[in-house]
Image (cartoon, grey):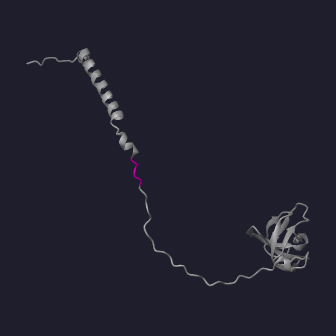
């Protein structure tokens, strides 16, 4: 027995009744979605604040404060105890007389000391050690007041003590 040859034609599936029914369902779903979106909200719920979760850290032990014994720090010699125009430990000095070449700051006093950096004319330093005589110069250990790592030994011939101004 032969099977009947059944082929579906696209025209039979896309007939006007099927298309109109699909269009009606599509419009209905869109209208229902819009109604749920706009009418499904309760205006009374709009005034209720949204709950906020606040995370708190777990409790920890409170550290005990141990008062250290105060150790007195050495008081540097102030410029005000030095005679006016003298360089000494605790005095502030200004670099000058290098004609723009800068003053070499060395790791040790003397011309053989390694050069750490060059200080510019008008730069101010605090004298922290010295004097040491070497290679025909009097050397002073200087430190920048704004950066303790910027320090070195320099010849006193290019240093001018800063004098306190009277008010």
Placement of 9 over or under 87, stated as above or below:
above
Q: Is residue 14 visible?
A: yes
For the question of whether residue 15 can be seen, the reply is no
Q: Is residue 55 within the magenta segment?
A: no
Q: Position of residue 59 (x, y in %)?
A: 43, 69
Residue at 91% over, 61% down: 99
Taking 48 as reference, is 117 left or right?
right
SS majority, magenta: loop
Which residue occupies 30% across, 30% down?
A: 32
Q: How many marks?
A: 0
The C terminus is located in which quarter? bottom right
Examine the structure image and report whether residue 50 is included in the region drawn in magenta: yes
The image quadrant of residue 145 is bottom right
Above-or-below relation of 103 to 138: above
Return the x and y of residue 74 as percentages of the image width and height: 74, 82
For residue 25, which quarter of the picture?
Answer: top left
| Residue at (50, 76) in percent of width and height | 63
Q: Quadrant of the image for the N terminus?
A: top left
Q: Where is 41 relative to 95, above or below? A: above
| In-image side of 35 versus 154 (left or right) | left
Magenta residues?
Answer: 48-52
Choose top left, top right, bottom left or bottom right for residue 24. top left
Q: Nearer the viewer, residue 120 or 61?
A: 61
Q: Residue furthest left?
A: 1
Give how far across and how far down residue 76 sits, in percent.
78, 79
Closer-to-camera residue (70/96)? 70
Q: Nearer the viewer, residue 19 or 28?
A: 28
């Amino acid at each position: 027995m032969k099977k009947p040859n059944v082929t579906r034609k696209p025209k039979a599936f896309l007939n006007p009744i099927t298309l109109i029914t699909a269009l009606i369902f599509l419009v209905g779903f869109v209208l229902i979605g819009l109604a749920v979106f706009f009418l499904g909200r309760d205006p009374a719920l709009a005034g209720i604040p949204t709950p906020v979760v606040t995370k708190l850290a777990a409790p920890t032990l409170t550290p005990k404060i141990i008062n250290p014994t105060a150790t007195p720090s050495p008081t540097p010699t102030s410029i005000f105890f030095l005679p006016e125009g003298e360089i000494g430990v605790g005095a502030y000095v200004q670099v000058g007389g290098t004609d723009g070449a800068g003053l070499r700051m060395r790791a040790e006093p003397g011309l053989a000391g390694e050069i750490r950096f060059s200080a510019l004319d008008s730069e101010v330093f605090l004298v922290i050690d010295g004097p040491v005589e070497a290679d025909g110069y009097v050397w002073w250990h200087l430190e920048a007041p704004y950066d303790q790592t910027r320090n070195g030994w320099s010849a006193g011939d290019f240093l001018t003590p800063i004098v306190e101004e009277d008010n």
